[in-house]
Each structure stands twice: as structure tokens, then as C-alpha cells.
Image: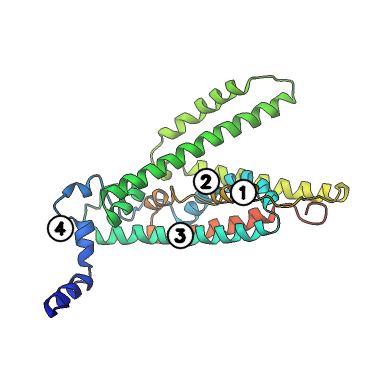
């Protein structure tokens, strides 16, 4: 390779000694030396917020969002995967926490290297990270994935909540159609979607975390009470189809990345998001602890 090309390549790969910024960063993020300026459309980066959520509130919010899903989904998945399911849960939980921390660092890096007004609010931080990495096409892809995940999860929870309410009230003699309950639940929860960002409804996250913790505690107490009278459980051989389906359920129950950047934006100190995500790891261990144990259940 000619010496001139080698020097040019080194100049591109090396960071700027004055600004300590990578030239490729300017090319992909700052909009310099690129023909299409539309890549920076609607990318707003926020700063530290004096009235944002602290680390504890953020941790509770993440726990409230993720824990309930896992409590509902993991028992059946663990039953279908057997003992290896415990290792799968630990592995996916570790990967989820690690990637969540990396996602938070990406947002901090983007916020520090982006020279925009500090008064701007980031409405779509996850797509903004994707755009900074690979341009507007990645922004569209990330937006689609986030919207598709949120929509699909919402449909599942609406169906599950309506079915549980129908079965619970049916035991009391109140017969109301599942379709009617689905409409009622959707109408009650719809106004909550009109709220702004997580800092505007952190109380809901606290309520979700408390109700999930109470439910897990009740499960543990009932397990202790029923254990002496329960026969030994029998588990057949693990089927490949059931294992793969359970793997997807476990992955779904231990995720939450689509909302991590949005929660981080509303933090008083966004760089402390990693501390809050570690609370997510702790609650995963707690949820595994609520699984039936002993010869009567395993």
C-alpha cells in the first residue's frame, strides 16, 4: 500500500488529538462531511435533569416493569425445560443485564459527544442510538422493533388480564364474557398511555413492584403450607419443541431493553443507570427463588 494511503487511513482511524473525537463519529453522528443531512432528523439529546428520577426510583420502575412479566411466564417455561432451565434463566438474565448496561453507556456516549441544546428532550432515545451508529435506516429498524415489541406485549397482557378477571369472578357467580372484560380493561388502561415520560407516572412502577413482591411472597408462603401434602411431581422427557418455545418465553420474560433508554433519559443522573439495572438482576434471582423446590415439586 502506498505511503500516502497508509497515512490517510491512519488519520481516519485515529481520534482527533484536540477534541478527542473520532473522525468517523463526525461522519456518522455530527452530520459533517456527509451529503444527507436528514440523518439527524428528530434526534434530541437531553442532559441531567434536576427534577428527574433518582437511582432508587429508577430501579423500582425497572423492577415493576420487568418483574410481573417474569412471574407470569417463567414457571411454565421452567417446567418445560427441567433443570437446564435454571441455567438458561441465569444465562439470559446475565446477558440481559450486561447488554442493558451497555445500552446505557451508549446513550451517555451519545449525549456527551452530541452538541445540541440542553433543553431538548429525547423522545426516542433508542432509535437515536441506532441512527448514530448506522444512520437513519437503522433508526427506522430500531423504531419498528420497539413498536412491534411494545404492541405485542400489550396485546398479550390485555388478553391475560381479561382472562384472569373472568375466571376469578366466575367463581363468585358473576358471569361476564371474556370479550367484555377485554374491552373494560383496555378502556381503563388506555388513559395511562396518555401520560408523558416515566418520571410522570413513577407511582405506577412502584405499585407494580409492590404487587409483584406481595404475590411472590404469597406464593412462597403457600408453598411452605402445601409442601407436606403434595405428592412427588413427575416430569416427562424434555421435548425439543417445548424447550425452544420455553427459551423464547424466558427471553421475553427477562427483557425490557425497549424501555431502558427512555427511563434513563428521565433520570436525574443518567450515568447512574447501570446501578438501577443491577436491581433488575437482583429481582431475577428473587423470581427464581419463588419457583417450587423440593421433592414434592421437582
- Residue 154 visible in the shown view: yes
Quadrant assignment for the N terminus: bottom left
Name the mark nearer the viewer: 1 or 4. Answer: 1
Judge from the rendering whether residue 77 lies leftward or rightward of residue 23; answer left or right: right
Circle on res. 65: 2
As helix, strand or loop, the secondary structure at mark 3 comes to helix
The answer to whether 196 is drawn above or below residue 231 in the figure is: above
As helix, strand or loop, the secondary structure at mark 2 comes to helix
User: Which percent across, then down, holds residue 67?
Assistant: 58, 48
Q: Name which of mark 4 and mark 2 comes first in the sequence.
A: 4
- Which residue is located at x 68 percent, y 56 percent? 289
Q: Residues within 10 Å of mark 4 (few under 14, many from 20)?
A: some
Circle on res. 246: 1
Quadrant assignment for the C terminus: bottom right
As helix, strand or loop, the secondary structure at mark 1 comes to helix
As helix, strand or loop, the secondary structure at mark 4 comes to loop
User: Which percent across, then down, holds residue 49?
Assistant: 34, 53
- Which residue is located at x 64 percent, y 56 percent? 286
Q: What is the CA distance from the residue labelled 4 to the residue labelled 3?
A: 30 Å
Q: Name which of mark 4 and mark 3 comes first in the sequence.
A: 4
Circle on res. 99: 3
Q: What is the CA distance from the residue labelled 2 to the residue labelled 1?
A: 21 Å
Q: What is the CA distance from the residue labelled 1 to the residue labelled 4?
A: 47 Å
Q: Name which of mark 1 and mark 4 comes first in the sequence.
A: 4
Judge from the rendering whether residue 230 lies leftward or rightward of residue 121; answer left or right: right
Q: Name which of mark 2 and mark 1 comes first in the sequence.
A: 2
Amino acid at each position: 500500500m502506498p505511503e500516502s494511503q497508509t497515512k490517510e487511513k491512519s488519520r481516519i482511524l485515529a481520534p482527533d488529538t484536540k477534541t478527542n473525537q473520532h473522525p468517523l463519529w463526525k461522519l456518522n453522528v455530527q452530520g459533517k462531511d456527509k451529503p444527507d443531512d436528514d440523518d439527524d432528523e428528530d434526534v434530541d439529546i437531553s442532559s441531567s435533569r434536576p427534577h428527574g428520577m433518582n437511582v432508587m426510583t429508577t430501579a423500582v420502575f425497572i423492577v415493576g416493569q420487568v418483574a410481573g412479566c417474569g412471574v407470569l411466564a417463567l414457571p411454565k417455561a421452567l417446567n418445560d425445560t427441567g433443570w437446564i432451565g435454571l441455567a438458561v434463566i441465569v444465562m439470559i438474565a446475565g446477558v440481559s443485564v450486561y447488554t442493558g448496561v451497555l445500552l446505557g453507556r451508549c446513550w451517555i456516549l451519545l449525549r456527551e459527544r452530541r452538541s445540541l441544546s440542553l433543553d431538548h428532550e429525547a423522545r426516542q432515545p433508542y432509535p437515536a442510538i441506532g441512527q448514530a451508529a448506522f444512520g437513519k435506516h437503522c433508526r427506522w429498524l430500531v423504531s419498528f422493533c420497539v413498536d412491534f415489541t411494545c404492541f405485542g406485549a400489550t396485546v398479550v397482557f390485555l388478553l391475560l388480564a381479561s382472562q384472569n378477571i373472568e375466571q376469578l369472578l366466575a367463581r363468585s357467580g358473576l358471569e361476564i364474557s371474556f370479550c367484555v372484560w377485554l374491552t373494560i380493561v383496555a378502556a381503563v388502561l388506555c388513559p395511562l398511555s396518555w401520560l408523558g415520560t416515566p418520571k410522570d407516572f413513577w407511582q405506577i412502577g412502584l405499585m407494580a413492584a409492590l404487587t409483584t413482591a406481595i404475590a411472590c411472597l404469597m406464593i412462597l408462603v403457600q408453598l411452605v403450607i402445601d409442601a407436606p401434602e403434595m405428592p412427588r411431581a413427575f416430569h416427562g422427557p424434555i421435548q425439543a419443541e417445548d424447550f425452544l418455545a420455553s427459551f423464547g418465553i424466558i427471553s421475553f420474560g427477562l427483557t425490557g431493553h425497549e424501555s431502558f433508554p427512555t427511563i434513563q433519559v428521565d433520570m436525574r443522573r443518567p450515568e447512574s443507570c447501570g446501578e438501577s439495572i443491577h436491581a433488575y438482576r437482583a429481582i431475577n434471582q428473587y423470581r427464581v427463588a419463588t419457583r417450587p423446590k423440593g421433592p414434592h415439586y421437582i
